[in-house]
Image (cartoon, grey):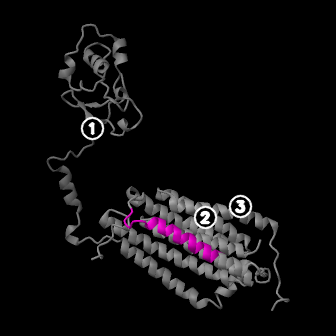
Amino acid sequence: MTAQLAVEAISTGEAWVFWILGPLAVLAAIAMVSARNAVHSALFLVLVMLCLGVFYVVQSGPFIGLAQIIVYTGAIMMLFLFVLMLVGRDSSDSLIEVLRGQRVAAILLGIGFAGLVATAFYRGLQDAPAQGLEAANAPGNVHAIAAIVFTRYIFAFEVTSALLITAATGAMILAHIERRRDQKQTQPDRMRARFAPGNYPAPKAGPGVYATSDSVATPARLPDGRFSERSVPQILPKRQLTEAEVAPKGTASPFGRRAESGGAADSRSGAAGRTNESAGNHASAAPSVGQGGEGR
Amino acid sequence: MQPGYYIVLAAILFTIGAVGVLIRRNAIVLFMCIELMLNASNLALVTFGRITGTLDGQIMAFFVMVVAAAEVVVGLAIIMSIFRTRRSASVDDANLLRY
């Protein structure tokens, strides 16, 4: 069986592809295992899968290569990312080692295993020439695969459909939330809870739009003249704003009728001067339009 | 180069995935490592098919892909239900069957 077998010569281009993408795949795999953030792990795994897809295409398997890219990086990894976004909060890993020395032992074991298996394969296969798939791919890769799948592997193919149906059903059952009929909240119940005392059904006051200010940091005013802290978005202090910028800004009056708001915002950054009573102590006799403008 | 190099690469990738399964705690990352191992075996299958000059290796890889898809769907659903009850995706927390 030696002389008749066709021997496929591996082109220089394929060698280049291998030596560029192979180390890239290994590095991405290591980065995937060692990344703290699970989303980074997923993206590194996408990179590995893309490299492998290119390898399949290079090894005269265009169909399996494209299926790799479409199914794995397109569908499966997006499913992973979807679940990561749902679980999200817990996506980072804990650093606590439950079994002492497990990590070092696992890495040593991995290095030993990789060394043994890779060496064995290399020694066993280094003289094995590739026969190549030109003859098998003669009618076209997809045609040839279809011809085998629907004849020799027809049983496995049909069993695969049963497996997929089972998997879909199982996923639906696992993701289903069982809710008893008496625990279900009906629409009248929801309405009663909405209009019950203690709950305010209408939209709350938004941040103010006044003649002198339309900033979202300007709080709305309650009927008694106080500022409503809840009308200012809570995300504002989390940005890189200073305390003075974050503080609720009063509605400075250009007519001097309420000069205290400008004075309070100036002297105390509005932090304590949120009620009219405290701000009234700062009422000065000479409020001007300019001062009111500065106060904002 | 020889096609055996692809097999060596597949062995290395498989080992990285196995080590990841051993050292990571997050269930989703564990699943990703399993996917890496399946991918490595796929690469080996495709390469073996090329060495022997038949398409059976690619078809095996195709079936492995299908099984991996089914496994991921069910596994992620299990992770979601565990997360829903325990608010954690760490495999160290799921130890109710321990004692």
Outermost residue, top side:
A286
- Find out whether residue A102 is within the magenta segment: yes
Would residue A168 appear left or right of B5 to someone viewing this image? left
- Name which quarter of the figure residue B98 lies in: bottom left
Q: Amino acid at mark 1?
A: Arg
| Quarter in which the N terminus of chain B is drawn | bottom right
| Mark 2 or 1, closer to the camera | 2
| Vertical position of residue A254 compared to residue A10: above or below | above
Question: For numbered disc 3, what is the local secondary structure?
Answer: helix
Whichever of labels 2 and 1 marks the residue nearer the N terminus, that label is 2
Q: Residue at x 65, y 60 (%)?
A: A24
Q: Is A75 situated above or below A266?
A: below
Q: Position of residue B70 (x, y in %)?
A: 49, 76
Q: Residues within 10 Å of mark 3 (few under 14, many from 20)?
A: few
- Residue that label 2 marks: A48
Cα–Cα span, label 3 and label 1: 57 Å
In the rendered image, residues at marks 2 and 3 fall on the same chain: yes
Q: Is residue A178 left or right of residue A118?
A: left
Looking at the rendered structure, the secondary structure element under dot 2 is helix
Residue at 67 percent across and 79 percent down: it is: A121
Q: Which residues are magenta?
A: A97-118
User: How far across and how far down the image is residue A285, in percent?
Assistant: 24, 7
* Residue A42 seen in the figure: yes
| Neighbour tally class for label 1: few under 14, some 14-19, many 20 plus, Cα within 10 Å | few
Which residue is labeled 1 in the image? A230
Q: Mark 3: which amino acid?
A: Ile
Q: CA distance from mark 2 to mark 1?
A: 48 Å
| Residue A127 location (% of width, % of height) | 77, 80
Q: Where is mark 3, residue-wise?
A: A20
Q: Magenta stretch: dominant SS?
A: helix
The subunit carrying tag 2 is A
